[in-house]
Image (cartoon, grey):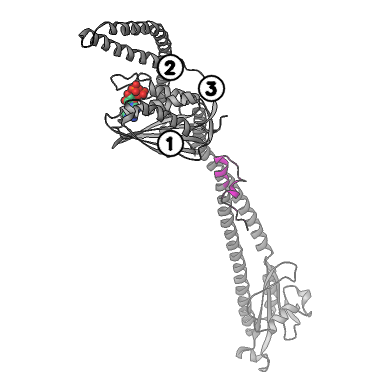
């Protein structure tokens, strides 16, 4: 069987905090007031009943004594008038004396004399419970009655034979009608005063709740919504020393800090935009200049080549021109990198296998003099799928990474390459594409210090004497165009790892 969860009941409750609290307090008040009124009513009713019962006992016992004294003194006539006087008292419903056979001998209502008494009274008289008050409703409403035998004792033997045990039975009934009426009016009074108290208490609690809880919370919610919508100039106004006041103050402080952070971010963003703009124009300018320099440089290099052959071997001038040629070559490399960087086009996508592309790069690297120092360890995923990429651009990426690894140390370099055909990119921020192919290149060089890690992808950042600082920024640009990514890691023990992610499926 399905269990109802904790939220199943609250689902039906109103969503406003004020209404929920009012409802809860209302239920508690109704229960408390209801229960206390009910018990008060019950106690009052019991007390009224007990009082009537006591009255019945007192009246019966008193009358019995009066009868005995009256009869003892032979003053039996006065008994009839006592009966009538007592019988006419309010609440006295029945006052009579009947004999052993149940025939009425004396009564507050003289017309009853000679008739048989009520069957219930006679039955009670014959039962062992006589002399204790009992309830009767023969008159249509509740009464407390008592039947009390008047025993034949020594004083009575003057007029009554000894053999007769009971001279007569006193039968008294007190009506509960008035008591019941007053209980009913009490109940009405109790109900209306409870209702009034309930309405007043609920009203006062409602006003306090609205003033001290609901309104401050509403103000908080409104300001929070404004903050959520980006308006950071609003503040919550809760002038109270309660927890809500403190919450409001902390919230205001939070908005102030948020606002400051946003301003700072906006300024930073603006600075970045200006910088990017400047870099873009600088890049364009640099590319233009590089283009202009490239051809004259080629001319100078050609001229130097001619010139170098003019001087015999060992001539210092030949050495100077040779040095000039090396410098010209380096200048040419820089200009080539710069032009490559500036002249980026959309990738020309073709299907290819990343393992094969890397293999080609490694072959190229091993042909260079630096490449001879490399010990290469491959851990290629045989299940590498074919993906869409610009293979020339991707080759450039791995060439840069591999050359950097070689330049990381002057002696033998250990380069480990690992590929995987199906991974989720670390810190994946491309939400709609979860799967990538991956290749990581690690070396055992000195590594990259943490403060430098954030800068190495910036254009023109280099720590090398002959570096251009364009290799990694170019790699990042290529991967951006492929909707992939590149990350760099370096541990405290040295060694750098560059990881490249390329999307498995082009969207
Ligand atoms: P360049 O190689 O011309 O300096 P890059 O953009 O390729 O330009 O590299 C930028 C900088 O990143 C390098 O100057 C170097 O400080 C650092 N770097 C790149 N790869 C490595 C590596 N494998 N080990 C240590 N430092 C590296």
Q: Residue at x 62, y 71 (%)?
A: 53
According to the picture, the residue beneath numbered tag 1 turns out to be 247
- The C terminus lies in which quarter of the figure? top right
Q: Which residue is mark 3?
A: 348
Q: Residues within 10 Å of mark 1 (few under 14, many from 20)?
A: some
**Structural crowding at the residue carrying mark 2, measured as other residues with C-alpha within 10 Å and reported as few (<14), some (14–19) or many (≥20):** some
Q: Nearer the viewer, mark 1 or mark 3?
A: 3
Q: In front here: 479 or 364?
A: 364
Q: Is residue 506 above or below residue 164?
A: above
Q: CA distance from mark 2 to mark 3?
A: 15 Å
Circle 2/circle 3 CB separation < 8 Å: no
Q: Nearer the viewer, residue 118 or 437?
A: 437
Secondary element under disc 2, as helix, strand or loop, is helix
Specify the quadrant of the image occupied by residue 79: bottom right
In the rendered view, does 375 fall on the left or right side of 394? left
Q: CA distance from mark 1 to mark 3?
A: 57 Å
**Residue 123 spot, x, y in % from top left:** 72, 81
In space, the residues marked 2 and 1 are separated at their CA atoms by 57 Å
* Mark closest to the chain's N terminus, 1 or 3: 1
Tell me if residue 5 is in the magenta stretch.
yes
Q: Are marks 2 and 1 in contact (CB under 8 Å)?
A: no
Q: Quadrant of ligand 1?
A: top left
What is the tally of numbered marks visible in this picture?
3
Q: Residue furthest front?
A: 312
Residue 222 relative to residue 369: left or right: right
Residue receiving disc 2: 340
Quadrant of the image occupied by residue 144: bottom right
């Amino acid at each position: 069987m399905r269990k109802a969860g904790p939220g199943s009941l609250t689902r039906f409750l109103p969503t406003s905090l004020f209404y929920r609290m009012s409802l809860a307090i209302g239920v508690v008040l109704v229960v408390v007031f209801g229960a206390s009124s009910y018990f008060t009513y019950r106690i009052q009713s019991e007390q009224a009943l007990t009082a009537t019962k006591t009255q019945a006992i007192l009246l019966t016992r008193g009358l019995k004594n009066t009868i005995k004294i009256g009869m003892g003194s032979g003053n039996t006539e006065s008994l009839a008038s006592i009966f009538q006087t007592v019988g006419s008292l309010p609440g006295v419903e029945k006052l009579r004396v009947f004999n052993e056979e149940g025939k009425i001998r004396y009564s507050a209502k003289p017309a009853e004399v000679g008739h048989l008494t009520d069957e219930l009274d006679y039955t009670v008289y014959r039962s062992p419970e006589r002399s204790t008050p009992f309830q009767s409703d023969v008159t249509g409403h509740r009464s407390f009655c008592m039947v009390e035998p008047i025993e034949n004792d020594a004083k009575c033997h003057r007029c009554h034979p000894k053999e007769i045990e009971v001279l007569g039975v006193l039968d008294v009934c007190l009506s509960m009608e008035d008591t019941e009426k007053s209980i009913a009016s009490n109940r009405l009074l109790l109900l209306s005063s409870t209702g009034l108290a309930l309405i007043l208490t609920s009203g006062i609690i409602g006003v306090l709740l609205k003033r001290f809880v609901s309104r401050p919370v509403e103000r908080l919610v409104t300001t929070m919504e404004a903050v959520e919508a980006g308006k950071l100039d609003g503040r919550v106004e809760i002038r109270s020393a309660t927890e809500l006041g403190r919450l409001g103050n902390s919230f205001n402080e939070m908005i102030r800090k948020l606002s400051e952070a946003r301003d700072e971010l906006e300024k930073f963003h603006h600075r970045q935009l200006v910088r990017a703009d400047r870099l873009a124009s600088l890049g364009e300018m640099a590319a233009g200049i590089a283009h202009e320099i490239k051809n004259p440089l080629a001319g100078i290099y050609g001229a130097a080549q001619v010139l170098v052959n003019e001087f015999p071997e060992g001539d210092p001038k030949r050495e100077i021109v040779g040095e000039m040629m090396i410098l010209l070559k380096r200048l040419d490399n820089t200009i080539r990198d710069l032009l490559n960087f500036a002249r980026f086009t959309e990738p020309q996508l073709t299907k290819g296998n990343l393992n094969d592309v890397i293999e080609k790069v490694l072959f190229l690297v091993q042909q260079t003099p630096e490449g001879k120092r490399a010990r290469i360890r491959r851990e290629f995923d045989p299940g590498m799928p074919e993906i869409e990429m610009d293979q020339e651009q991707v080759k450039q990426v791995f060439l840069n990474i591999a050359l950097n690894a070689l330049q990381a140390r002057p002696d033998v370099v250990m380069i480990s390459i690992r590929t995987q055909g199906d991974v989720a990119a670390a810190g994946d921020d491309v939400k709609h594409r979860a799967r990538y192919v991956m290749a990581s290149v690690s070396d055992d060089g000195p590594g990259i210090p943490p403060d430098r890690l954030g800068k190495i992808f910036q254009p023109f950042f280099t720590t090398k004497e002959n570096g251009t600082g364009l290799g990694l920024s170019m790699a990042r640009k290529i991967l951006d165009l492929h909707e992939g990514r590149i990350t760099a890691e370096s541990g405290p023990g040295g060694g750098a790892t560059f990881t490249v992610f390329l999307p498995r499926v082009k969207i």
